[in-house]
Amino acid sequence: MDRRELLKMVALLTGGVVVGGEVFLTGCTAPGTADVGFTPANISLLDEIGETILPATSSPGAKAAQVGDFMRVMVTDCYNQKQQEAFNNGLTQIDEESKKLNNKTFMESTPEQRKALLINLEKVARQQDKDQDTKEEEKKEQAEREKKEYEAPPKHYFTMMKQLTLMGFFTSKPGATQALRHIPVPGKYDGDYPYKKGDKAWAE
Amino acid sequence: MADNIYDAIVVGSGISGGWAAKELSEKGLKVIMLERGRNIEHVKDYVNANKEIWEFPHRNVRTQQMIKDHPVLKRDYPLQEAVVDLFANEKDCPYTETKRFDWFRGYHVGGRSLMWGRHSYRWNKWDFEANAKEGIAVDWPIRYDDLAPWYSYVEKFAGIQGTKEGLEVLPDGEFMPGMELNVVEKDVAKRIREHYKNSRHMFVGRTANITQNHEGRVACQYRDRCWRGCPFGAYFSTQSSTLPAAMKTGNLTLRPFSIVKRVLYDKDKKRATGVEIIDAETNQTIEYKSKIVFICASAFNSSWVLMNSATDIWPGGLGSSSNELGHNVMDHHFRCGAGGKVEGYDDKYEYGRKPVGVYVPRFRNIYDDKRDYLRGFGYQGGASRSGWGREVAELSIGSEYKEMLCEPGDWSIGITAFGEMLPYHENTISLDPDKKDKWGLPVLKMDVEIKDNEKKMRKDMMEDAKEMLEAAGVKEVTTNDSGYSPGMGIHEMGTARMGRDPKTSVLNGNNQVWDAPNVFVTDGACMTSASCVNPSLTYMALTARAADFAVNELKKGNL
């Protein structure tokens, strides 16, 4: 087994992982539909949601990394039907939540309002995902005992949007080479390399 | 070659087949290596080797189409965008699962030597003695000392990086300078050694990654992208190592798209006369003749070839007179261990991406240790600082959150165990009479499970990991058993075992089929037991040893 795969397993073991291999690891019995039908407005909305999560700072933000379009590709090609439905519903729900909190749609909101909304949504999403995980545990264990494949139900739509934003940004060229450091061919290994606060992490 | 006549036929081009082709052709034999899949040319055909993550449309994540096309591969990590084309087409090449069996195959030149984990360990003396001592299955017909010089021989050519540790349980080999542990791995290793008074050890995994230029290959550049094929040839594969050596002799013909259907057998002479293939592209049937045949088609497919051969004499196929052909399937059971956080080391990081972590050799059921199960397990693992996927306390979005994720997180370390699986006669593969592949050939049916011995061992595999890490000062240690299905170790072994008696084994101590001494099986199929260490180095050594024996016997006129 690859060290890369081992380290992923370690990350899962040690908990606290927002985006791990497990997100996409489970199989699926109902493949997604080919055309999920994202509109240019959807992509703009997702770009702005992404930018609120990971804004431009001294390095480019999520929008510069085109996370909206990345989400379109991933939801269309990699999500199963249930995940696609949950994600698509999220596109309208997020505006409803926005209206409740800020009396305007997400796109009409100020950066501060957007931020307040997403901080709220994150709390709701976390709780909902946690409750669902607890409920699913028994099912999952049963599937393991019976050596059957287990398919997890979709996470809260905001969890999906945030995961895709992180992945879409940090694996993009601007994310990997400007927000992080990337050396395609390191040429050597140093396992005792000095680090000081503020130094950027390596991209994979 | 005229009339398709060669001195030797090698079936399969993976780790074992590549070695057979190299050894036989270097000893002057005219050799044809038959590979069922397409050709992959070294460097030129490693299409993803130099791609950056953002150049993959799905950033190496599996798509629904990939999941649909790979109903088996999707069950574990190998299904990834960057390597998906290196795994067998499951629609064309189905198999039957009486019980769930995860079979991850590479049907192309180089086989799984292109995608292997590269861990390369010698077996120890106890591994070869255990069956006899414990009354399990049958005794190995060879001992460590028979194989030791061949381990040295293959290590020198393959290029294994590692450190000499002087341990009986994991004999040292001919190593290139070992890759460095990182600062956390080093300290954890030191604390484990101290706590267990030098009875447990952690050191760099021994892998077939070269750390010095070697045989025209360039030393590892620490990209950690081995899986996609290495443009530097820095890890051992058929393409980087054995194939160029064999080609240099001018004695080797490589024929891709050649599915070997059966061994041709002369019952009067009790010898194979060659093989029959189907051209995978044209469906044409062709015969190749030779003095000797090396079957290295990967464990199960090697036995599949035997099962389809000489059925007019033995309905169960060549080698079935022992009633052991297809039996005693083994793998390594794994996916359980422990991990936790390592405090401090905030001023330390890594430069470069090393393709290997740590190894902890077996410590159970050796010397005075006695458990309620037989055999043991070893660990692989590693320490690293977490990346952007981590949870950040108190922050969920915004500039500050982003800036934090742009820096590395805390250190953590984890180890996962690989356990020995006993050879059970009732763990079998057989031909499924009801299902055929794309070429109308019968497919395999798997009926394999782990039993009490493995299940008991798994508890130790988890708990020992936790105890060791805690003893080394690792915090918040959690154990994990992600579940195991046979095959997931991708270390299929057995089904044509070596032994001392033709009544209870398929092969003798030189890997010859008892019923056809000019047919050799030297891949995972030949294994009589499984040890707990990664098996490929042992296949290399067995193959080189058998090739040497075969050529000597040919010269003596015994084959």
Image (spheres, coloured by chain):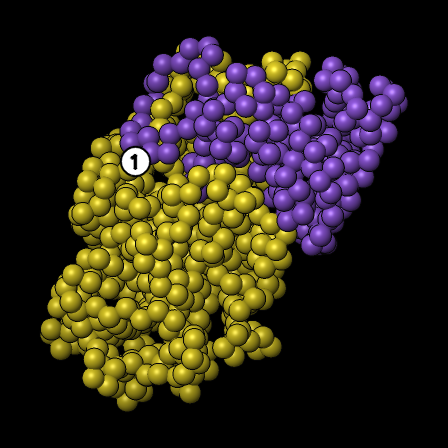
Rendered shade, chain B: yellow
Rendered shade, chain A: purple
User: In the displayed image of the protein, which residue is found farthest to the bottom?
Assistant: B268
Most foreground residue, B336 or B236: B236
Q: How far across and down, in percent of the image, does residue B142 sit? A: 27, 56
**Which residue is at 57% across, 31% downward?**
A65
**Which residue is at 20% across, 84% downward?**
B2
Among the 4 quarters of the image, the one containing residue A63: top right
Callout 1 crowding tier (Cα within 10 Å): few <14, some 14–19, many ≥20: many
Q: How far across and down, in percent of the image, does residue B135 sit? A: 41, 54
Most foreground residue, B175 or A34: A34
One can see residue B100 in this view: no
**Which residue is at 49% across, 53% downward?**
B84
Most foreground residue, B247 or B363: B247
One can see residue B285 in this view: yes
Q: Classify mark 1: helix, strand or loop.
A: loop
Q: What residue is shown with label 1?
A: B221
Most foreground residue, B140 or B337: B337
Q: Mark 1 lies on which chain?
A: B
**Which residue is at 40% across, 66% downward?**
B37
Q: How far across and down, in percent of the image, does residue A170 sit? A: 54, 29
Q: What residue type is labelled 1?
A: Gln
Is B26 on the left or on the right of B310, as rendered?
Answer: left
Above or below, comparing residue B10 to residue A137 in the picture = below
Above or below, comparing residue B345 to residue A87 in the picture = above
